[in-house]
Image (cartoon, rainbow, N blue to C red):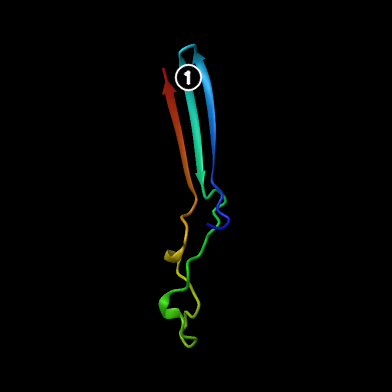
Amino acid sequence: MGNQVDFSVLKNTQIRESMNLQFKGEFLNAFNHPVFALPVANAVNPANSIFGGTTASNQGNYPRRVQLSFKFLF
């Protein structure tokens, strides 16, 4: 899907022998690089004012998403 970069970071921290805390950060489309879809169907006529254009809803991928989570393991 083009130049879309996804990555995640994970950190485990031992609190006691049987207790752990886990932090996770997930970054989808981390650099927010848009992939535009094909031009809208009514934009094929050169006399049309939106000739060859796309709309904001025609983005082929999703915008940047960040998810942070903590997990306590015992």
Which residue was labeled with disc 1?
A: 20
| Vertical relation: 42 (above or below) 24 | below
Residue at x-position 46% and y-position 55%: 62
Query: The residue tagged with tag 1: helix, strand or loop?
Result: strand
The reply, left or right, for residue 74 in relation to residue 46 is: left
Residue 4 locus on image (x, y percent): 55, 53
Closest to the observer: 64 or 1? 1
Return the residue found at the far front: 1
Residue 36 rendering spot, x and y as whole percentages: 50, 65
Question: What residue is shown at x 46% (from left), y 62% (from top)?
Answer: 59
Viewer-proximal residue among 4 and 72: 4
Quadrant of the image occupied by residue 42? bottom left
Residue in the image at 52% along x and 24% along y:
12
Mark 1 closeness class: few <14, some 14–19, many ≥20 residues within 10 Å: some
How many labels sit on residues?
A: 1
Q: Residue 37's spot in the image, x, y percent?
A: 47, 66
User: Can you say whether 52 is above or below 30 in the image?
Assistant: below
| Residue farthest along the top direction in this orientation | 17
Amino acid beneath label 1: Asn
**On-image quarter of the C terminus:** top left
Find residue 14 and report its horizontal and vertical position in percent.
52, 17
Position of residue 33 relative to residue 28, above or below, is below
Q: Is residue 31 left or right of residue 65?
A: right
Residue reaching furthest to the bottom: 47
Which residue is pictured at 44% across the width and 66% down the height? 58
